[in-house]
Structure formats: C-alpha cells, structure tokens
Image (cartoon, rainbow, N blue to C red):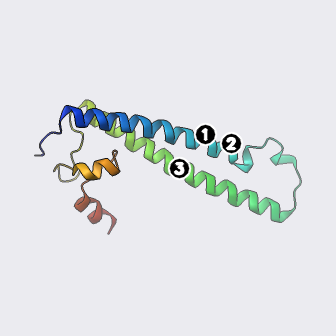
Amino acid sequence: MAKKFSKTFIKKKKESLLKDREETLRQIEELKKDDPFADPDHASDNAAIDTDVREQVGHDTIQAQIKSLNRKIEFIERAFEKIAKNKYGVCERCENQIPSKRLDLIPEAKYCINCEQELIQ
C-alpha cells in the first residue's frame, strides 16, 4: 500500500486542482462562444456549401476540444473525491503511490507512470 503525502502537499495539490478546474471551465465557455453553430443566424443564413463545410468542421473541432476538457474536469473531480477519502496520489490500478513529480505535472493523474503506459499499449 502507498504511503501518504503530507498535509501541505495535499493542500497545494488541492489549490492547484481548484485553479485547473476554474481555468478549464473558462476554456469551455470560450470555446462555446467561438462555435460557429452558436450563432443564432447560422440555421437560416443560406451560406455557400463551402462555408457550411467550414462551419461544420469548426463546430466538430470545438466539440472535440470541449469533450476533452470535460474529461479533464471529470478527472479533477475524481481527484477531489480521492482527497476527501484520503486516497489522493494512489494509483487506481496498482495502488502504489504516484510520484510527486508526476502529480506536480498532472495533479489529476489517476495512474502511476508504469500503469499509464501499460494501459495505452
């Protein structure tokens, strides 16, 4: 079983996660504003076919970005749950401690580096 991180470390990670969540939510709102389909005149503008294609591609790209950011939000929320259960920084697969340097880069990390690599192969 993994050893526990200090309260100071956990507090810093929680603050980092809060900032990440806020920034990610802000990015999602900005993307929604930039979505060509967000324009109320889009449905009735009778644009040329090439314009429609560009708008569709733009919309699809923004939707993919939003989906990715929403996934990050889910990971951040899961990290908050782990903090509340005193299990933050524990790999969900092998239950070893995730290295602090990894958590510095990805505070919402679910897996240690070894398990992450095994899962993506």
Residue at the bottom extreme, as displayed: 121
Q: Is residue 100 left or right of residue 58?
A: left
Q: Which residue is mark 2?
A: 33
Q: Looking at the picture, how far across and down is residue 35, in whole percent?
A: 69, 48
State which tag comes first along the sequence, 1 or 3. Answer: 1
Q: Is residue 56 above or below residue 39?
A: below
Residue 67's tag is 3
- Neighbor class of circle 3 (other Cα within 10 Å; few <14, some 14-19, many 20+) is few
Please give the name of the residue rendered at 56% of the width and 43% of the height, measured from the top-left corner: 27
Element assignment for label 3: helix
Q: Considering the image in quadrants, where does the C terminus appear?
A: bottom left
Mark 1, residue position: 29
In this picture, is 72 found above or below 47? above
Residue 34 visible in the shown view: yes
Picture residue at 34% right of the left edge, 45% below the top: 108
Q: Position of residue 3 (x, y in %)?
A: 11, 43
Query: What's under tag 2, amino acid-wise?
Result: Lys
Q: Are marks 1 and 3 in contact (CB under 8 Å)?
A: no
